[in-house]
Image (cartoon, rainbow, N blue to C red):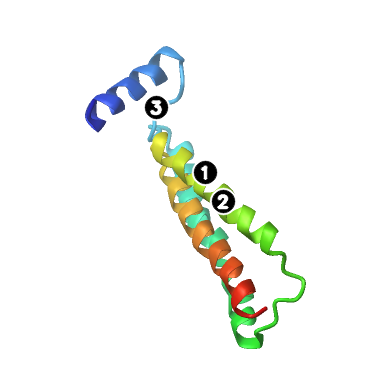
Amino acid sequence: MDSHHLHHLHARKRVHQNLEQYPSPNPRIKLLDDILLVIAVIGPLVTIPQIVQIFETQDVRGFSPITWGLYALFNILWLIYGVVHKEKPLIVTYTLWFIMNSTVFVSIFIFS
């Protein structure tokens, strides 16, 4: 079944379950959707100063490879979920979070 047919099934599911149309025709909800997409980009980018500090100081004391590795793994699962459900904010957010968390994870091994 191609993606057009899957989209049709997804749209029918929304109608039959009385879910809101996406993108929303309501300007307030559309604004919220747009804000969420911006936050989806900004949120992960706030990790950049931490990554810069790690690479400048080469000090990774206090960073757990298990924690950062699990963050990256969980990001992959959320990314798959976003792709399956065609949720652009989730796809953007968890792609960026995966990059950030993986960078910290790898840097722990580089600088240990």
Which residue is label 3 attached to?
A: 21
Picture disc at residue 90: none
Residue 70 picture location, percent across and down: 63, 53
Q: Secondary structure at mark 2?
A: helix
Q: Secondary structure at mark 3?
A: loop
Residue 90 picture location, percent across and down: 48, 45
> How crowded is the residue under tag 2: few (<14 C-alpha within 10 Å), some, or many (20+)?
some
Quadrant position of the N terminus in the picture:
top left
- Of label 3 and label 1, which has the lower sequence position? 3
Quadrant position of the C terminus in the picture:
bottom right
Residue 81 picture location, percent across and down: 47, 38
Mark 3 or mark 2, whichever is nearer to me: 2
Identify which residue, 46 or 76, lies in the foreground.
76
Mark 3 vs mark 2, CA separation in Å = 31 Å
Which residue is label 1 attached to?
A: 77
Is residue 88 something one can see in this rendering?
A: yes
Name the residue rendered at 55%, 61% in the picture. 44
Name which residue type carries label 1. Leu
Name which residue type carries label 3. Gln
Mark 2 vs mark 1, CA separation in Å = 7 Å
* 62 with respect to 30 (left or right): right
Name which residue type carries label 2. Leu
Which residue is label 2 attached to?
A: 73
